[in-house]
Image (cartoon, rainbow, N blue to C red):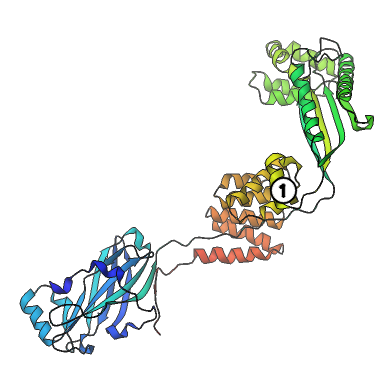
Amino acid sequence: MKFLRIFPAVLAVAFASQAQNVEKLHISDIEAGRDGSRFNVSMKVRPCDFKLSLNREIEIIPVIWSADSSQAVQLPSLMIAGKNMYYYNVRNDGPGEPNLLYRAGKGETVSYSQSTEYLPWMETSTLGFTQRELGCCGGPEGEPETTPVARIDYRPNVYEPHYLYTRPQATGEKIINLKGQAYVDFPVNRTEIYPDYRKNPQELLKILKSIDAVKGNADAKVKQITLKGFASPEGPYNNNVRLAKGRTQALREYVGRQYDFPASVYSTSFEPEDWEGLRDSLEVSFLPQRDAMLALISQDIEPDRKDALLKQRFPVDYAYILKNIYPALRHTDYVITYTVRKYTDVNEIKHVMESRPQDLSLEEFYLLAQSYPAGSKEFDEVFDIAVRMFPNDTVANLNAANAAMSTGQYERAEKYLSRSGSGPQANYARGILLALKKDYDASISMLEKAQKEDLPEAGQAIEAIKAAQRHKTPVRFISND
């Protein structure tokens, strides 16, 4: 039937002003909305208010189009016809759907109600009416005009958090500790160093390369080289004192011969028997008598007696310890303490971060992060590297938690927040994480705690969360001028 024609080119027409009054279409009481898998449109039309000549007609087409105007769906159109065209349509098209064909200037207000399949793109779309004027032969006259009447938005309310990044306090002199561990081998019961003995070439090189890395850095100055030697609990305690002390001194002399540092740069100490290391190794082991051995180690017993009891009570496990754990307890911990000049140029900071991130302060990491857009890959990466350099710093962990939340890594954020302290900024971040995980009641409770600690952003976050929880009207009708 002519009055049910669909015009594929509807998207090509020029939209009228959003504020254009639909009263000229004599339409009122427009309602629209989704009902399950259907999208319904209803309204009232007053054919009696249309003033048309005998041979003219107007077609009104409800249309829904996508936010980017790439897709559209038209509902059945209404035809308002002058006297001659009205009877022409009735005679030529039969009874058809007479509720969609009306005679201009006659009749009461009629109701229109139609629906179409709800499609995914309709989640954010526009409802409007296209009006086409037709002449005596049914041909269009002039350009069709489309009037938007409602914005459709069925997207769920989503809380958009605001992250608070904390600027670290400025530091004075930058003092860096480069730590390492070397396993230098000595012949049984001897304290002399043999550089080529067993794995000594590579173990000694560990220490030398660490010192060279600092010494070769024009921005750094070595302040101290600390060596601490450890022996295992095997053998008499007094002999282990001699071995730990003598081997540490031998290593200090070996390192001293490689450089021209003054003697005051070196600092040495020793641990005759590394019981703490033994405890740590047992705790992560799967030995059958692990718990009983740990209990024995914790007792306040003279060292030689303690080692003898381990050997006597747990002979099988002790054999394993002797072969696999004690050798690793004979080691030297070394620390190269040095100062580094401060960096203020972000390009220089970026270069240092890529080559020597350990030489940067938290403040310098923060300055570099601020040179990138918040939430960008580079922005988040800076805070991720910073927390790796300062794993126990509360500010580093707090900023890393914010970066992790912004990229949806909630488990990582929770780990960082566990090391972020208990200040208002940390409680604020915990509240944000709870909101992102949709635990809104707990989130508001945590944010209220931060608010009481004089953090105004916490109150703003509470209002934003409550707003996201409130019902949103999915169809907003455009007001008329």
**Residue at (13, 83) in percent of width and height:** 136
Quadrant (top left, top right, bottom left, bottom right) of the C terminus: bottom left
Q: Is residue 225 above or below residue 176?
A: above
Q: Residues within 10 Å of mark 1 (few under 14, many from 20)?
A: many
Q: Nearer the viewer, residue 432 or 78?
A: 78
Residue type for callout 1? Ile
Q: Position of residue 114 (x, y in %)?
A: 24, 70
Question: In the displayed structure, would residue 178 be above or below residue 276?
Answer: below
What residue sits right under mark 1 in the picture?
A: 349
Residue at the image point whose x is 20% and y is 88% from the top: 48
* Image-quadrant location for residue 1: bottom left
User: Taking 435 as reference, is 324 left or right?
Assistant: right
x and y percentages locating residue 381 in the rendered image? 62, 47
Drawn side of residue 51 relative to residue 472, left or right: left
Residue 465 percent across, percent down from the top left = 55, 63
Q: Is residue 475 above or below residue 160?
A: below
Residue 422 horizontal/vertical position (percent): 71, 52
The image shows a total of numbered marks equal to 1
Q: Secondary structure beneath disc 1?
A: helix
Q: Quadrant of residue 64?
A: bottom left
Q: Determine whether, in the image, residue 272 is placed left or right of residue 160.
A: right
Task: Evaluate whether residue 276 shows in this view.
Answer: no
Is residue 110 visible to the viewer in this orientation of the structure?
yes
> As rendered, which of 264 and 283 lies closer to the eye?
264
Question: Which residue is at the front of the view, 242 or 314?
Answer: 242
**Going 68% across and 21% down the picture, which residue do you hit?**
290
